[in-house]
Image (cartoon, rainbow, N blue to C red):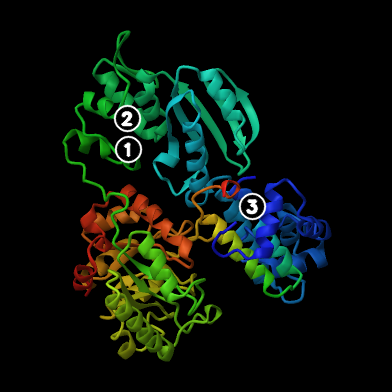
Amino acid sequence: MTNQEIVKILHEMAEFLEMKDVEFKPRAYEKAALGIDGLDREVKDI
Amino acid sequence: MEIPGIGKGIAEHIESLLKGKRFSEYENLKKEIPVNISELSSVEGVGPKIIKILYKKLKIKNLVDLEKAAKTGKIRKLAGFGERSEQKILKGIEFLKKSGGRKTLGYVLPEIRTMEKMIHAFPEVEMVSIAGSVRRMKETIGDIDIVAISKKPEKVMDRFIGLPQVAHVYAHGKTKTMVKLKNGLDADLRVVPRNSFGAALNYFTGSKDHNIALRDMALKKGWKLNEYGLFKGKKQITGRSEEDLYKKFGMQYIEPELRENTGELEIAKNNKLPKLIPYESLKGDLQVQTDWTDGENSILEMAHAAKKAHLSYIAITDHTKSLAMTGGADEKKLLKQVDEIEKINKKFHAQKIGFRILSGAEVNILKDGSLDIKNEVLEKLDVVGAAVHSHFNLSREEQTKRVVRAMENPNVDIIFHLTGRVIKRREAIDIDVDEIIKSAKRTKTILEIDAYPERLDIKDEYIKKCVEAGVKMVIDSDAHSVSHFKYLELGISQARRGWAKKSDILNTKPVEEFLKSLK
């Protein structure tokens, strides 16, 4: 699984959780997506 | 696993995804809410809250459903919606369709580079380069062209189709393979012999117009140019390297970013091409947001990240009060921030850390061109950027007058992201750019090249106008997180596409010199 695919799932998670009015968690998923997006290597290699 | 911004819970989910295990919370949510959420939220103004209502009330699951509902007037009837919001959704869909399947360069570049590295590591590959619009650093790209040298092309092709990014193979040939990637882009790999590499790279880098003009020049000399080389009759004159190819035409080497047939060939013949601003030549970043407003990180964290990105100064430019949604700063908060910055700078000085934080703000330009922060406070800041964040639909005349008035304020040093466009999402405001450039020159105001992937604002075409008019620019990341300083590269690429030299971009200067160049 590539970084892009993981980022997409994390974004989707954030949006699903926001649709369900879950507190705080959407922000955490957004932050995680940002973090992975900022990496210059593949997560699977870490 | 240690990745910034990721807590233990999410890290575990990612690990199971990587191990091919189930992420049951995600799967359950998808089952419970069977909507194409990333497709719907790519429409400007449509977010989770709206998607929820649309799904509950109208069973809208995807873009087709959304367009149908909006066109048949179903959305305006929902509580909290109206004709205006329905029109806005239709406009958003229209704009999305217009930008087609092209992807924003900054968002796909890291993955393309990863692929390039992986191909480079194939034992049979001697050399590989990305060509096409990616190499020319166009703001959006339609597909990916890759050129490689190998004596065993079939082996290379077999490995290529096995890459983890590949979703589908269209054609698996001996020297040419076409695939669809998981990110939705098509990618072509061509393997050529060493003595054709330069010609092939040139051919597949484009632009098409540049290539046609170059081929015409060859014909006039009685030569022939194609992807295998430059030929006189059957004899190859050159083909190994692009440098040599341009040299044979009696020209300077033309950087990929300039190859748009906008005069570069003639100018290269006369040896008059500018020396473009080199990558990695920025010393500062003048637009950085922090957790004082809508950024992710603290002032100190941003400073450390900037230092790691080889910068020696940043300006902290949090939003101001009329942008309520970002928790914009008022005068009191800004002055408090100035004190905080001074404290950190003193600490840096004492610890002999060669880094300086400048105080600043991203001040909001109000409808009439006045600012939402008092001048006595702006005077106390090192750098003031001003930007339009509302009233995007004013007439061209009003919009231009509005920004000119902001530039006439002696405290406004920089206009941030002038046209307000968001690539693939929001159209630019209607503004007379020539008039703005004239006024920028008169008022000594700097225009920003916002390097954030979906902004790239001002764009390459306007950068060139600034260069010609002698209006100075800065390249800023518009960072909202420590990982965003890498976007500066995208800003530099657009500056290069706009023919900018190092001297056109003020944040290539050390901090003292930069501050002296402000009005």
> Residue B17 versus residue B92: which sits nearer the camera?
B17
Viewer-nearest of discs 1 and 3: 3
Which disc number belongs to residue B213? 2
Which badge, 2 or 1, comes first in the chain's sequence?
Answer: 2
Q: Is residue B275 above or below residue B31?
A: above
Q: Is residue B453 above or below residue B248?
A: below
- State left or right for residue B405 relative to residue B141: left
Name the image quarter holding residue B518.
bottom left
**Cα gap from disc 2 to disc 1, whole angstroms:** 7 Å
Dot 2 amino acid type: Ala
Q: Is residue A27 above or below residue A6?
A: below
- How crowded is the residue under tag 1: few (<14 C-alpha within 10 Å), some, or many (20+)? some
Dot 3 amino acid type: Ile
Give how far across and how far down residue B227 sits, in percent: 40, 22
**Residue tagged 1:** B261
Dot 1 amino acid type: Asn
Chain under numbered label 3: A
Q: Is residue B131 visible?
A: yes
Give how far across and how far down residue B376 sits, in percent: 31, 90
- How crowded is the residue under tag 2: few (<14 C-alpha within 10 Å), some, or many (20+)? few
**Helix, strand or loop at mark 3:** helix
- Residue furthest front as drawn: B351
Chain under numbered label 2: B
Give how far across and how far down residue B88 sits, in percent: 62, 65
